Image (cartoon, rainbow, N blue to C red):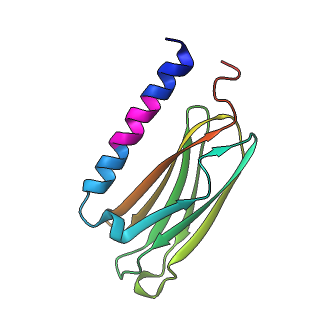
């Protein structure tokens, strides 16, 4: 088994575990939902993320992250509680090759109210290693 095959197996297992953990969190899908067009991108990539947030008086912040093995980026949006808009869009530009976990979290003052994540692949992550 080569390194690339082992990485794909590990990424698949981690993604499955994340999906199960998110699906089992009570009400998490009711609070936040991620929408990404595509899972595979050419590098350098611009990844556009649409996040649906269910308005709620406790909502304070939307945090969106692109967490890769060689790069981490994040963006935060102030939410207006129950009067806030439902759809938010965030772009991460010039992402180099790699595997990225795209994560969205809705925060209250004291806790994470909901979270969702998806895996994307940019270019050939095996390049340069």
Residue 116 falls in image quadrant: bottom left
Residue 88 image point, x, y percent: 57, 72
| Nearer to the camera, 110 or 7 | 7
In terms of secondary structure, what is the magenta stretch mainly?
A: helix
Viewed as shown, does residue 114 lie left or right of 6? left
Residue 29 image point, x, y percent: 35, 65
- Which image quarter is the C terminus in? top right
Q: Residue at x 40, y 85 (%)?
A: 82
Total labels drawn: 0
Residue 113 falls in image quadrant: bottom left
User: Extreme bottom residue here?
Assistant: 83
Q: Residue at x 52, y 20 (%)?
A: 5
Q: Which residues are magenta?
A: 10-17
Q: Residue at x 23, y 63 (%)?
A: 26
Q: Residue at x 50, y 28 (%)?
A: 8
User: Extreme top residue here?
Assistant: 1
Q: Is residue 86 above or below residue 126?
A: below
Residue 94 image point, x, y percent: 75, 46
Residue 80 image point, x, y percent: 48, 81
Assess whether residue 125 is covered by the magenta stretch. Answer: no
Viewed as shown, does residue 38 lie left or right of 22? right
Residue 108 appears in the picture as rendered: no
Residue 68 appears in the picture as rendered: yes
């Amino acid at each position: 088994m080569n390194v690339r095959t082992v990485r794909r197996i590990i990424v698949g297992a981690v993604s499955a575990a994340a999906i199960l953990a998110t699906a089992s969190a009570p009400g998490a899908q009711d609070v936040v939902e991620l929408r990404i067009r595509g899972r595979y991108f050419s590098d350098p990539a611009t990844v556009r993320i649409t996040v649906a947030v269910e308005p709620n008086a406790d909502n304070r912040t939307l945090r969106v992250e692109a967490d890769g093995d060689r790069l981490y980026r994040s963006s935060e949006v102030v939410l207006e509680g129950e009067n806030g808009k439902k759809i938010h869009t965030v772009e991460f530009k010039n992402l180099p090759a790699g595997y990225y976990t795209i994560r969205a979290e809705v925060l209250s003052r004291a806790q994470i109210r909901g979270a969702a994540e998806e895996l994307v692949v940019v270019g050939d992550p095996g390049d340069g290693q």
